[in-house]
Amino acid sequence: GTSGRHRFFWAVLVVFAMSSIDEIWADMKLSAKPKPSSSCPTGAGDLGKLSQKAGMARQEATNEVVDTAELKVSVMNAKTIPGRGLMMMAAKNQGHESQEDMQDGMDKEIQLMSSSDVSQRRGALSRLLTLANDTNCPPVVQRQAFQGLYVEVIKLMADPVERVRDSSLRVLLSFFDVLDPPSLGCALPLLLPTLLHRVGSTPPIEPAEEVRLLCMLVTSRVMSIFGRRMGDYIEALDSICRTGMQDVHPLVRHEAANIITMLARTLKPKLQQIVRIVPSRQGEDKHYRYGDLILALKPSLRHKHAKVRVATIEALKSLLLCGEKNLEVIEDLVCWQQPNVIPVWHFFNGGVWEDGQLVKPEERETQHNYLAVLAADTSPSVRACFLRMVADWMSSLHDRWDHESRLLPYLLNGLCDEVSDIRKEAHECMERLGAVHEDEKENNDRDKQELRDFREYGHRSPAELNSAERWAAREQEPPFTQRPRLGARMVVRNNFKR
């Protein structure tokens, strides 16, 4: 019985084993024969078919990803990915389905965003991006989708895959464009610390330049939406901007300068805060937040891209208007030092001790007159922006009287510019400065009589009278169409001897 069946089984197994051994032996004999030459049509055809099939397989795998040319972002086609819970949620909401179905759809997307599979995470972000950009989608669906999924989207900003981080930031930008501020405010306590972690350190943790640019765009968009509400996050914004102004990517610097401009216009009291007090021989030096940001802007004033220089000038103009005592900042920008005074370190080639450390002459940072560099810039747009900055400083700074002699030469230099539009711009700035000077004289009892004498009696000396006659008789040269107003002439005369 049983032993007979066992013997039959083993006999069948031996027969099959022998047949397989015979086949293996036959294959070995065939392999031992000389191989056909490369001109053999059979071998070439087999290898060609195999290579063609492999190429088709790679092409099919590549077609699933569409790479955009702008910032190397990859967005997967949401229709080819199973489990489109988010799209079903939008469709059901249009059909007035229950709230439970919508919650189930979001729970499914949360699971996909937390998956270890890269394609599932990218697919979930692609569906969310499609939902945010869909003009036919009801706003209530977009709001509920953002408020239910923003935590997972912000988590993916630290994903190890660059394209996932890229897509998550684009999703945030898309929702910022379509939702109102009350719907977006819930994301700030998590979004700002994440941005600070990724791009707020030196060097930044985020390695990709394009992703760092998207982080700066998100920060700029948040700043433009919430404005004064961002005062609670001034520390994070300060670190992000100072790090962005050191970035190698020019667009990152440009966007960081724009953020600084918005900070100076909306959070001026926050920038006037004292960040640290440094003891010195004269006492205690107070360092303000806007002063540290100005130091971060200085290298970008000599950037090779004119667009970056223009944005930096706008940020510098807004920052300096935040302060009340800007003497040290102006002196640093014009590289001013007291005449007939030589620093001590010039006499010691081995260096001098400063703040507890030895500083050698070759280790010192080279000082530049940044205002002179900007006045001679090769770009007309930079020179025009620089003239507007100087005019605003001379007419709006709290301590502008202390800086007239240092700033006026750069404004007068614009009257001799090779571009006619810049000469007109400089003339308009001088007229505006003259109007401000006249108003200040009118409101000052001590100087009111001087201005009144000029207006009523004209020129005091025959030489000045002859000068006025010669001016009226001569032909005007551009940009002058008439004699400059009285206030502008008084400003130039008072500072000419300096």
Image: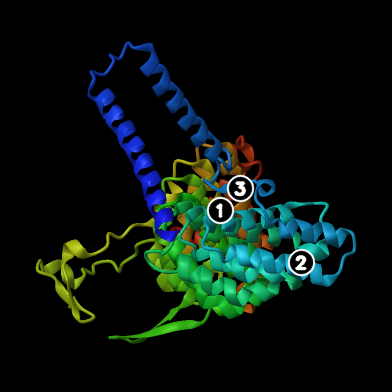
Give the label, 3 or 1, closer to the camera.
1
Give the residue number, with chain letter if any, for mark 1: 119
- Mark 1 residue type: Ser
Q: Residue at x 39, y 23 (%)?
A: 47
Which quadrant does the C terminus fall into?
A: bottom left
Q: Nearer the viewer, residue 459 or 171?
A: 171
Q: Residue at x 80, y 59 (%)?
A: 90
Task: Count neighbours of disc 2 (C-alpha within 10 A) and say few if under 14, some if 14 to 19, many if 20 or more.
Answer: some
Instruction: Report whether residue 237 is seen.
Output: no
Q: Residue at x 26, y 19 (%)?
A: 35
Task: Count neighbours of disc 3 (C-alpha within 10 A) and say few if under 14, some if 14 to 19, many if 20 or more.
Answer: many
Compare marks 2 and 3 and give the one earlier in the sequence.
Answer: 3
Secondary element type, mark 3 = strand
- For the residues marked 2 and 1, what is the alpha-carbon distance in whole angstroms? 25 Å
Compare marks 3 and 1 and give the one earlier in the sequence.
Answer: 3
**Label number found at residue 143:** 2
Say left or right for 203 vs 428.
left
Q: Nearer the viewer, residue 439 or 24?
A: 24
Q: Residue at x 36, y 18 (%)?
A: 43
Q: Are circles 3 and 1 on residues that touch, CB within 8 Å? A: yes
Q: Nearer the viewer, residue 464 or 175?
A: 175
- Mark 3 residue type: Met
**Label number found at residue 76:** 3
Residue 218 pos. (x, y %): 59, 61
Residue 455 pos. (x, y %): 68, 61
